Image (cartoon, rainbow, N blue to C red):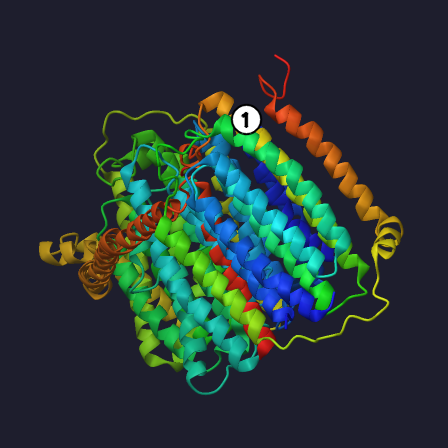
Amino acid sequence: MISLPVVLAVAALMFAIGLYGVLGQTNAIMVIMGVELMLGAAMLNVVGFLRYAHPDATGGSFFVLILMTLMALEAAIGFGLVIATFRNRRTAEIDDLADLKG
Amino acid sequence: MSDLATALVFWPVAVLMLATGLFVFITSSMARAGLLLLAALGLEGLLFLALASEFLGVLMLLMMSAEMVIMVFFMVMFMPDPGGLMGMDMTHDKRRSIGAAVILGLALAIVAVVTDWPARVLPPDAPDVRAIGFEVMGRSMFSFLFAAMAILFTMVGGVLVAKQGGRYER
Amino acid sequence: MAAVLWLTVLVPAAAAALVAVARPAARGLAVAGAVAAAIPAWVLLVAAAEGEQVRSSSTWLPAGELQAGLVLDGLSALMSATVATVGLVVVVYATGYFRERAASALAGLLAFLAAMQGLVLAEGFLTLLIFWELVGAMSARLIAFSRDDPRAAAGAVRAFLTTRAADVGLYAAVLALLAGSGSLAFGTDRPDGALDALVGLGLVLAAMGKSAQAPLQTWLSGAMAGPTPVSALLHSATMVAAGVFLLVRSGETLAGWPLEVAGWVGAVTAVGGAVIALAQDDLKRVLAGSTTSQLGLMFVAAAAGGPALALFHLIAHAAGKATMFLAAGVFGHQRGGTGLDRLGGAGREDRTTFALFALGGASIAAVPPLAAFWSKDAIVVAAEEHPAWLVLVLIAAAGSAAHVLRPALILWRGPSRDGTRSAAGRRVMVGAASLLALASLGLGAVGGPLADLLGAAAPETSAVSVALSLAALLAGAGTVLLAPRVPIRLATSVRRQLYTNEVLRALAERPLLIAARLTDAFDRRMVDAAVDGTARGVLAIARAEDRVERSGIDAAVDGLARLVGRGGRQSARIQTGRLHEYLRDTLLGATAIAFVLVLTALT
């Protein structure tokens, strides 16, 4: 009953939720959370393909591994930046970080 | 897992995952947001398990648990209203972002459903964790190494960025 | 011998240059130079007498193969010797005549000698033309020698313009001859058709101009404003004789009707010149008129009798007239001018000079046995075939006697005046003049050998001609002695050269001025107006273009700049600095790209 389109659709919806978070949230950490959700959706996509289209593609699993690594790295750097920003400006709201307004 | 078992596990877990993911951004309490995210990604790990990627599923569960705890930690540190008792609206461009998200999601879903994907049945001798290990240690060693280096740099870089006084000695 | 030919021309030229440079030694150098210049000429004469004929020429223009150079034959040798001898005498005289600026004058005389030698030795019309112009230029320069006398410059200008205007005839004739007959050697037959008239009339016109024949005779009187040595050399013996020389030299080229025309011109001028000379107030002007008359006789000789006659009279006239001029110069120095009112009795005081004057004058008046008597007699003989000419010649002979006797009487008899100065350098001048006077005595015997040299008919005399000549002589002398009074009006009109100048002015000068004024008005009214109009038009166009540029183009450019600025400001609104908006825009862009890719993949 579960087939590739279903998995992909679910992943799409999750991606959309993550996108809403990235675009709609003001706090930097919430944005990072949104990105995590989007990456998760991507991982789900790959796993779906692995299960239903290319079961013998071990490279796909490795790819998911890399994606997971990316999630962690992005979160790490992001939090470091938030700390630095908070130190200087006492705020983590991205609306207050509009210095490059041209 | 058999198809039936897969279906039985898949649907509730998927729905729950989506719901928790959505509520991450609806709730006004930061602690709850972090925990909800943990739930969402953990459920995703379960999905991996159901979809015959055991290694990845376990890995996901392990990673997310630790990561989300750290995230909650940070949120409490830097959020203006961690408890969420004040009920602040922390969104901007609500309509536009919702609109963009909905449109994109629908578009991708439609594409996913409509496209004629090549289907294959899981063969009995599907590659397992051993195969993944060989893959990582063999063909993908290079990428693995780079990933490892990236982690190292990120650790060092992240600490430097967050250091008091900035990156340079005064 | 070719080298001697060139030496004859080059030695006086070199002497002129030397004299001009070495001013202190000018007089001695000039005499030495003149002697050195005369030697090659005499050598040429001797060679020609022995029958030598030499030609030395080179190509002047490669196109048309025009030659230029010098030739030695009887005619050229004769003329060359004459020019050299008279030139030597005059140069010696000039060393005594000029008290100031002697070097300049002597250099000028020597340069003129060089040019004149080139003219008489020319081997073709082209070379002749070149030296013809040089001689004219030297003449004008020498006439204008005095820096104090305003008449000198005016006389030089008149002389130059008149002879130059007549030289147009020579140019036209040379061009027509070259175009029609293809050769510029002497004696080339005239081409047919219109060019025939051009050649014939052109040559005669040039001869008339140079020899001061009517109606172009007025310049000679004006030329008398120059120094007397110049008058003696140029305007009695050599340059004015160039016209006659041209007639003789052209040979076959002028055969037929052009010589007839020349003969008529000469006959009329002979009478006219003699009569005009009778009425002049200045001794040199008397001599000028006399020269005109005698040249007319030479024209008649060339037309009626042939080259030998013309040359005979030319040489005899040269000796006599030059003597008279040189004597007049001495008188002029003594009395401070040559006006006849000043010169009364000068002859009585300076009898030597008067003797010279009388000798030369007697020759000119055709008193036998002096030289010019024989030559004029030959002309009378030759003119017997043209009765009209004969009559005119006899009248002219009478006139010559009269106009020589009149000034002689004034010089001898006139009331003596104070203010006589003894001329410095008189001995030199008198000595030189006496040489020529002696020549006047003896040259009568030259006629026969001269004709042999030229290979032409010998001058003849007959009892009839002698009788006619003597009768004319007595008639003329008698007129002066017996009837000294002439009606005033007649005298005035004759003195004014029968109003030739006025006629010429009306005929030539007035129309030229009118044409000039018309052309100037045209130029100013139309051409200038056109140019100014164009300038104004250009300025108007420039101003309009400036307006267009300022309102149109500048406005367009400014508008474009404003547009770009506005566009920039609008584009800058994208850069809000808000991260989520950047992300949204990135998403939009990625969506668009994906859309396009999908579409291209589907089609």
Percent position of residue C425, x then y: 46, 28
Residue occupied by mark 1: A83
Q: Quadrant of the N terminus of chain C?
A: bottom right
Residue drawn 79% across and 58% down? A59
Query: Against C56, is B42 above or below?
Result: above
Closer to the camera, C475 or C174? C174
Question: Can you say which quadrant of the picture contains the C terminus of chain C?
Answer: bottom right
On the question of residue C171 being in view, the answer is yes
Expressed as whole percent of the image width and height from the top left, the position of residue C540 reads 21, 56
Is residue C287 at least partly visible in the picture?
Answer: no
In this view of the protein, which residue sits in the foreground, C515 or A49? A49
For this orientation, the residue located farthest to the bottom is C193
Tell how many labels. Answer: 1
In the image, residue A21 lies at what x, y percent?
A: 47, 47
Q: Which amino acid does label 1 sit on?
A: Ile
Camera-side residue of A30 and A10: A10
Name which residue lies at 60% across and 34% down. B69
Q: Is residue C490 left or right of residue C126?
A: left
**In the visual, does B145 lie left or right of C220?**
right
Question: Between C296 and B25, which is closer to the camera in this rendering?
Answer: B25
Chain letter of the residue beneath label 1 in the structure image? A
Q: What element carries label 1?
A: helix
**Quarter where residue C296 is shown:** bottom left
